[in-house]
Image: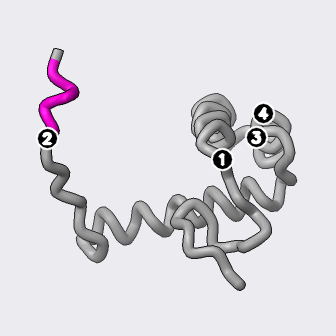
């Protein structure tokens, strides 16, 4: 059965919140002009192959495209008041 998680469309490629944060940080360091970019991002994330991180990036770009084009509405979160400082 395929996963319905938005972080991955591949059922055997679950990403933890920690892996996603490492992925984001690695993307900030290794831009599109970095040689062997996906290998370096995979090494920074750990437990993911270069192909898995490349696919995760493609899913992210697709999701952003849908959000920016208005095809996925931005949620209207209600404040609970617990985040006030």
Residue behind mark 3 = 41
Q: Are marks 3 and 1 in contact (CB under 8 Å)?
A: no
Question: Regarding mark 3 in the picture, which secondary structure is present there?
Answer: helix
Q: Give whichever of discs 4 and 2 has the lower sequence position.
A: 4
Q: Residue at x 71, y 85 (%)?
A: 1
Residue 83: percent from left, percent from top:
21, 26
Precedes in sequence: disc 3 or disc 2: 3
Provide the residue span drawn in magenta: 80-84
Q: Earlier in the sequence, mark 1 or mark 2?
A: 1
Residue hosting label 2: 79
Q: Within the image, what quadrant is residue 14 found in?
A: bottom right
As helix, strand or loop, the secondary structure at mark 2 comes to: loop
Say if residue 18 shows up in the picture: yes
Furthest residue to the top?
85
Mark 1 vs mark 2: in front: 2
Q: Residue at x 68, y 53 (%)?
A: 15
Distance from Cα at disc 3 to Cα at disc 2: 36 Å
Q: Nearer the viewer, residue 53 or 46?
A: 46
Q: Is residue 66 left or right of residue 60?
A: left
**Contact? badges 4 and 1 (CB < 8 Å):** no
Which residue was labeled with disc 1?
16
| Colour scheme of the rendered structure | one colour
Q: State the residue at coordinates (15%, 22%).
A: 84
Q: Quadrant of residue 85?
A: top left
Give yes or no for contact between labels 3 and 2 (Cβ–Cβ under 8 Å): no
Disc 4 to disc 1, how far (Cα)? 14 Å
Q: Is residue 63 above or below residue 34?
A: below
| Camera-side mark, 3 or 1 | 1
Q: Label 1 crowding class (10 Å Cα cut-off): few <14, some 14-19, many 20+?
A: few
**Main secondary structure of the magenta stretch:** loop
Looking at the image, residue 16 sits to the left or right of residue 66; the answer is: right
């Amino acid at each position: 059965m395929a996963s319905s998680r938005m972080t991955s469309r591949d059922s055997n490629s679950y990403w933890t919140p920690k892996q996603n944060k490492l992925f984001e940080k690695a993307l900030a360091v290794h831009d599109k002009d970095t040689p062997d970019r996906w290998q370096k991002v995979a090494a920074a994330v750990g437990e993911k192959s270069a192909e898995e991180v490349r696919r995760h990036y493609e899913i992210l770009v697709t999701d952003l495209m849908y959000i920016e084009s208005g095809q996925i509405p931005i949620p209207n979160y209600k404040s609970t008041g617990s985040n006030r400082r």
